[in-house]
């Protein structure tokens, strides 16, 4: 189940992104006011910027209305204003007052003529025109230009349209730089004409380019949705909409009152070389619009005033001349930005958790707003803020939903766990939910329930793990658990002690095959066959010996580790193997130490061999000879011979029994080592003396040849002389008469210093193929059975046991000239072998 969910995650994320993009499209297309409001926000965040000082508004303000009288003024007043301006030499005048009619008769005509003369005299006055619905003869209204009366229009330098383009919220954010009547008569915007006049740009120098318009040296980016006409002879007149970069709220531009000009209160330099815009700023005139800086409240500093039309023209001129034009982003860029913000949000939520997630989301939102602000204020881009914020916010409910789904899933799983393992998990909800249950209300499991459940589960699981560990470590048997690849994943203390190492290693898991191959004789090819049997659910028994000193004999039971694979998170070898009992996911090895039993078995076998063969043969010959002596009259010579045989067989019996007992006592540890510093040459002499008689009988010469200056050796002298006696007596026994036996001792200096005691004879030799078997108990060469040399086959076994008890060894080799040399090597520092108890 968890894996399935992970594989579904990309699909879920893709769905979230698709839905998110759809939401972004819906929000930006169907709620455009949000985009507009976001631009207002950015204008206010940026605040006021200083406009160009060359733009001056000459205002028909409240003060002028008070002093000159209410509007409309006699046109001679405006004529005087223009005359005064002419004297002050501004670069251009934009007269934002539409004088559409003139009276026909004198004396009313005179002031109009004055104004026309003043305009004509100045020669640099832009006059306004605007479109209106004119009823046509056909009854259908036609859109035509309402121009100044011809008396004025003829004198004006040029006419410019004074329309602005309010958005759907009635707020002015842009201007259409060109407008046309139904008859296709196009007029450029009032502000464009003022700039053209001021800079002396010819109309021919206005060029419409894709996405922008060039006016002389100004390249003005415009929103240009018009596509070129495909009908021959029809020219599409573009609206050339330009976003206005408002410098600030109403009153940001330098404004002079007309009444001050008429009263000579204006300093001449304030108007010289200026672009002067004459228009109404008095609120009572009604020529004002709401602009981005306008907001509720009446504090003028807070932008509580609507913006007079003339100031909007000032803002347009300022935008173009200060080259502060905004660039807009395309819809696809907007969607891409939304996609980016969604992806970032998804990343944050996928990879971070808790307070980190909240902080990262906060930072992301701050980055979106700051980035948008910087793009707006520094790069003059109208950023897709709404798209990005929508992308950001749209993703979040889905993520909340995801965590709700996860939380619900956790509930279900915990509840299932509680139900499936009643012993393991007491119902932690019993207290918190009992009241609700009694009322019959099933409350959804809350965080408290989850926490309690997890806590209780953890405690109980830990307790259970502790219990299982205790059971494992208290077992007398070793336990090893492996996975199907044979990697050891668990072992108990006893198993570790068998192999003298920690078997279950996390970093570099130990392979069972390596362990069993290196510690004893288990052929690597044998294990796979065993594993196959185990996978087939057979319990396999294996006898195994750890080749330590002393060897440890184990019986290993291998059985299948069966589990519900998903719950254990282990690899399943074969799905078809899965049945009601679960699947095989590994092996369990139970290791029993059977060393004692094996030893006992060996002893038993040996004892049977001893009694049935080694003891029975001499006994039966004693029995037979004594019966002859009892029942028959035998000559004195014969009876003497028979008695001698009885005596030698009895001695052999006694020797065999005492050697066997010595060996067993030594092996079982019943005879401890009593080590003392020992003078070796002395010990050798004693041994030789004991055997001189036997040697003399066979005319064998014993030569003692120990090195002089031998260090004293710390050994058990009794045992060592036993061993030497055996080697020396063998040398005498298995040599022909009139030969020499040499017994020597020398110091061997390798990394461990040894004393080597050698017994060299000129005897019958030992065939090399016999090898180490010569040291086995009761082993005798075939030739001994016919030669009549008395022996038990225990002597060399005892020599080896004594050597090993001293940490040394015994070896032999055949000499090229015939005969054998036995070497007993004992380390100077005796590492005594641990005896088995
Ligand atoms: P045994 O009591 O029969 O001598 P050992 O264990 O001492 O038993 O010797 C085992 C066998 O090894 C003997 O039967 C003998 O054949 C052979 N053997 C031992 N020492 C020598 C030797 N020095 N030369 C030849 N054969 C030897």
Image (cartoon, rainbow, N blue to C red):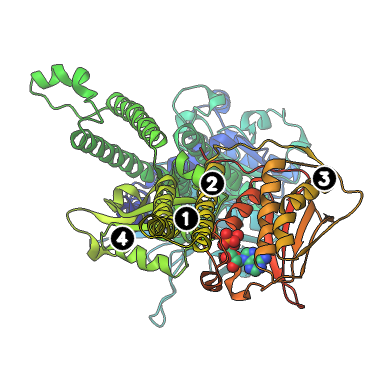
Q: CA distance from mark 1 to mark 2?
A: 30 Å
Residue at disc 3, secondary structure: helix
Residue 730, position as x, y percentages in the image: 65, 61
Q: CA distance from mark 2 to mark 3?
A: 25 Å
Mark 4 surroundings: few (<14), some (14-19) or many (≥20) residues within 10 A = many
Mark with earlier residue (4, 2) = 4
Q: CA distance from mark 4 to mark 2?
A: 49 Å
Q: In front here: 353 or 716?
A: 716
Q: CA distance from mark 4 to mark 3?
A: 62 Å
Q: Quadrant of ligand 1?
A: bottom right
- Identify the residue at image location x=49%, y=43%: 39
The residue tagged 1 is: 545
Is the Cβ of the residue at disc 1 closer than 8 Å to that at disc 3?
no
Mark with earlier residue (2, 3) = 2
Is the Cβ of the residue at disc 4 closer than 8 Å to that at disc 3?
no
- Identify the residue at image location x=49%, y=47%: 504
The residue tagged 3 is: 682
- Where residue 658 is drawn, which disc sits there? 2
């Amino acid at each position: 189940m968890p894996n399935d969910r992970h594989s579904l995650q990309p699909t879920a994320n893709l769905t979230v992104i698709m839905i998110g993009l759809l939401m972004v499209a819906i929000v930006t297309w169907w709620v455009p006011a949000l985009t507009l409001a976001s631009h207002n926000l950015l204008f206010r965040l940026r605040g006021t910027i200083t406009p160009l000082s060359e733009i001056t508004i000459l205002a028909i303000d409240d003060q002028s209305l008070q002093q000159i009288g209410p509007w409309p003024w006699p046109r001679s007043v405006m004529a005087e204003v223009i005359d005064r301006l002419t004297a002050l030499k501004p670069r251009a005048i934009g007269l934002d007052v539409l004088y559409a009619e003139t009276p026909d008769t004198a004396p009313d005509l005179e002031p109009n003529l004055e104004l026309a003369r003043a305009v004509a005299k100045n020669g640099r006055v832009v006059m306004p025109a605007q479109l209106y619905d004119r009823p046509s003869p056909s009854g259908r209204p036609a859109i035509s230009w309402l121009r100044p009366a011809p008396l004025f229009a003829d004198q004006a330098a040029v006419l410019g349209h004074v329309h602005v383009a309010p958005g759907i919220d009635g707020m002015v954010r842009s201007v259409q730089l060109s407008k046309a009547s139904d008859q296709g008569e196009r007029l450029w915007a009032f502000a464009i004409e003022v700039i053209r006049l001021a800079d002396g740009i010819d109309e021919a120098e206005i060029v419409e380019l894709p996405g922008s318009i060039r006016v002389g040296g100004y390249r003005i980016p415009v929103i240009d949705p018009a596509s070129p006409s495909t009908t021959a002879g029809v020219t599409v007149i573009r609206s050339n909409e330009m976003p206005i970069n408002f410098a600030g709220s109403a009153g940001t531009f330098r404004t002079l009152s007309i009444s001050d000009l008429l009263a000579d209160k204006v300093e001449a330099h304030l108007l010289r070389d200026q672009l002067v815009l004459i228009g109404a700023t008095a609120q009572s005139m009604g020529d004002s619009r709401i602009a981005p800086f306008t907001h509720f409240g009446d504090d003028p500093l807070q932008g509580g005033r609507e913006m007079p039309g003339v100031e909007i023209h000032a803002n347009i001129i300022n935008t173009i001349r200060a080259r502060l034009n905004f660039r807009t982003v395309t819809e696809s860029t907007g969607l891409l930005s939304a996609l980016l913000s969604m992806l970032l949000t998804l990343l944050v939520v996928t990879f971070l958790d808790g307070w980190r997630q909240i902080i990262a989301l906060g930072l992301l939102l701050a980055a979106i707003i700051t980035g948008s602000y910087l793009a707006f204020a520094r790069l003059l881009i109208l950023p897709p803020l709404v798209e990005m914020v929508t992308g950001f916010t749209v993703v979040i409910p889905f993520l909340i939903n995801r965590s709700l789904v996860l939380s619900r899933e956790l509930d279900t799983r915990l509840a299932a766990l509680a139900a499936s393992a009643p012993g393991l998990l007491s119902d932690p909800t019993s207290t918190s939910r009992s009241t609700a249950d009694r009322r019959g209300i099933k409350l959804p499991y809350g965080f408290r329930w989850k926490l309690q459940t997890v806590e209780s589960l953890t405690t109980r699981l830990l307790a259970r793990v502790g219990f299982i560990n205790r059971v494992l470590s208290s077992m007398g048997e070793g336990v090893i658990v492996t996975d199907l690849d044979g990697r050891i994943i668990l072992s108990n203390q006893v198993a570790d002690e068998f192999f003298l190492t920690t078997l279950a290693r996390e970093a570099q898991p130990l392979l069972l095959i390596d362990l069993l191959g290196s510690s004893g004789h288990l052929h690597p090819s044998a294990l796979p066959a065993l594993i196959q049997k185990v996978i087939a659910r057979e319990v396999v028994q294996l006898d195994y010996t750890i080749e330590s000193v002393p060897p440890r004999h184990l019986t290993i039971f291998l059985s299948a580790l069966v589990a519900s694979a998903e719950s254990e998170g282990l690899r399943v070898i074969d799905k078809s193997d899965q049945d009601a009992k679960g699947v095989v996911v590994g092996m369990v090895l139970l290791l029993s130490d059977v060393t004692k039993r094996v030893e006992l078995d060996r002893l038993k076998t040996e004892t049977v061999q001893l009694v049935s063969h080694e003891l029975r043969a001499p006994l039966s010959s004693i029995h037979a000879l004594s019966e002859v002596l009892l029942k028959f009259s035998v000559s004195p010579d014969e009876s003497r011979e028979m008695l001698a045989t009885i005596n030698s067989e009895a001695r052999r019996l006694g020797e065999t029994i005492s050697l066997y007992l010595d060996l067993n006592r030594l092996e079982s540890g019943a005879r401890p080592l009593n080590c003392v510093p020992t003078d070796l040459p002395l010990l050798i002499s004693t041994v030789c003396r004991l055997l001189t008689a036997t040697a003399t009988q066979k005319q064998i010469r014993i030569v003692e040849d120990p090195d002089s200056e031998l260090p004293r050796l710390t050994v058990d002298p009794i045992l060592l002389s036993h061993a030497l006696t055996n080697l020396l007596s063998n040398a005498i026994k298995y040599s022909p008469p009139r030969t020499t036996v040499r017994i020597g001792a020398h110091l061997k200096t390798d990394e461990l210093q040894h004393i080597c005691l050698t017994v060299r004879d000129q005897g019958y030799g030992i065939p090399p193929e016999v090898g180490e078997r010569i040291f086995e108990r009761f082993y005798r060469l075939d030739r001994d059975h016919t030669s009549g040399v008395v022996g038990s086959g225990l002597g060399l076994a005892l020599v080896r046991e004594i050597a090993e008890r001293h940490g040394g060894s015994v070896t032999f080799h055949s000499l090229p000239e015939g005969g054998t040399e036995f070497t007993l090597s004992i380390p100077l520092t005796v590492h005594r072998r641990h005896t088995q108890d």
